Image: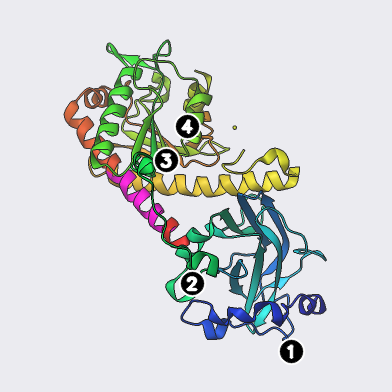
Amino acid sequence: MASRTNRRVLLGGGLLCLAALPCADSSRLIAAEGQPQPTVAAVNYPIASAARLAGDGRQTRFILDLDRSVTFRAVTLADPYRVVVDVPQINFQLPAGTGGGGRGLVRAFRYGLVMPGGSRIVFDLTGPAKIAKSYVVEAANGQPARLVLEMEEVDRAAFVASLAPESRPELRPAIAEAPPATVPTAAAPEAAQPKADSRPVVVIDPGHGGIDNGTQSSGESEKNLVLAFGRALRDKLEKAGKYRVVMTRDDDTFIPLGDRTKIARNHKAALFVSIHADALPRAEGDAQGATIYTLSDKASDAEAQRLADAENRADAIAGFNLAEEPTDVADILIDLTQRETRTFSNRFARLLMGEMKATVRMHKHPLKSAGFRVLKAPDVPSVLVEIGYVSNKADLEHLVSEGWRSKAVGSMAQAIDAFLTKRMATAGNAN
């Protein structure tokens, strides 16, 4: 295996320009190709067993299967256009010929050892592109750990602007020497058109509606209680102005579960929050307090399963056309997206519980999971919040109280803001 790894060591000629790599330790990252390389011992280093590309000329995703998680650093370089990923030393056990062919934005890629303790993957691009997302997912459910890099097509001006100042190349003479553009008078109205709203989208989903009343108690209907709560949460978020809020329903309308999920996906939502207020049969006890549910294949308890079954009675990964992918690649893309989405959903659920427990009564087991259809958008972090049980007298008194609703809405809005602020900051650092 050592001989295979040494054969895949990057050749020096193609990477000498990386000496200008914009980082504090760039001197240590200068390519060491062409020098005698130490043997890579499989027992000491992470093993890369497979690599693949998916996507098209607008968006391309690279996936590297590993036997354990690794840290990494990814940067873009110009003239020629490349993406460079530096990782700790890896034992590349990839099939012969891997990287020789490209797809989408990637013409080809190569990999190997560049220095003792350090490996590198270099992607030759077909044109300017940005790193839209880059992350590592942990091994789970029989699937290996995976390093994922998502690249998006951009024009040269945007590409150059995205580079660190010290690494920006001089624009080509034809561009640099062009006279300043003048805007004709007739074009002024078009230039003055407002920009598209780029704020993150939060989808609020008041459960039930129309012919589906949900649960009812003491003359109160779940569909009306959760609609009032959803409207109050929308108003709170819109007043802050940081997010664009979409309601799956804003009146007494029945919306099928599948359509609720589609609304979130069509708006490329950053978060989906479904609001409910259920009831339990007497035989299952007099439960009370708010409960937060996330999606799982196996319910966390019998109560969660019963609720999911009841709600479920009353789907293409964003940007990637899976119909054009081999079945095994499509399955991997779905698995990656679902794992990442569930991680974010669970993170938000814990954050929401922390905020809500300071202001409202929580269920004795406030975090649960089950197979809710409405939470199954593979690429939108989603939670279902039971704000209380209409079958419980104390909960019902809270649910009809504007004062309680205001406190609960405030804590939920705080959790949403904290979650999305951190996600936006992380996404900004990754680009």
Residue at figure coordinates x 32%, y 24% from the top left: 226
Please say whether residue 372 is one of the residues in the magenta stretch: no
Sequence order check, earlier mark of 2 and 3: 2
Secondary structure under the numbered disc 4 in the rendered image: helix
Give the residue pinned by disc 3: 271
Apparent side of residue 183 relative to residue 81 in the rendered image (left or right): left
Q: Residues within 10 Å of mark 3 (few under 14, many from 20)?
A: many
Q: Which span is picked out in magenta?
A: 414-426
Q: Residues within 10 Å of mark 1 (few under 14, many from 20)?
A: few
Observer-nearest residue: 282 or 73?
73
Residue at figure coordinates x 48%, y 58% from the top left: 158
Q: Position of residue 374 (x, y in %)?
A: 49, 30
Amino acid on which the number 2 mark rests in the picture: Arg
Sequence order check, earlier mark of 4 and 1: 1
Q: Are marks 1 and 3 in contact (CB under 8 Å)?
A: no
Q: Are marks 1 and 2 in contact (CB under 8 Å)?
A: no
Q: Quadrant of residue 318?
A: top right
Give the residue pinned by disc 1: 36
Sequence order check, earlier mark of 4 and 2: 2
Magenta region, mostly helix, strand or loop? Answer: helix
Give the residue pinned by disc 4: 304
Sequence order check, earlier mark of 3 and 4: 3
Q: Are marks 4 and 2 in contact (CB under 8 Å)?
A: no
Secondary structure under the numbered disc 1 in the rendered image: loop
Q: Are marks 4 and 1 in contact (CB under 8 Å)?
A: no
Give the residue pinned by disc 2: 168
In 3D space, how far apart are the residues under numbered discs 4 and 1 (Cα atoms)? 60 Å
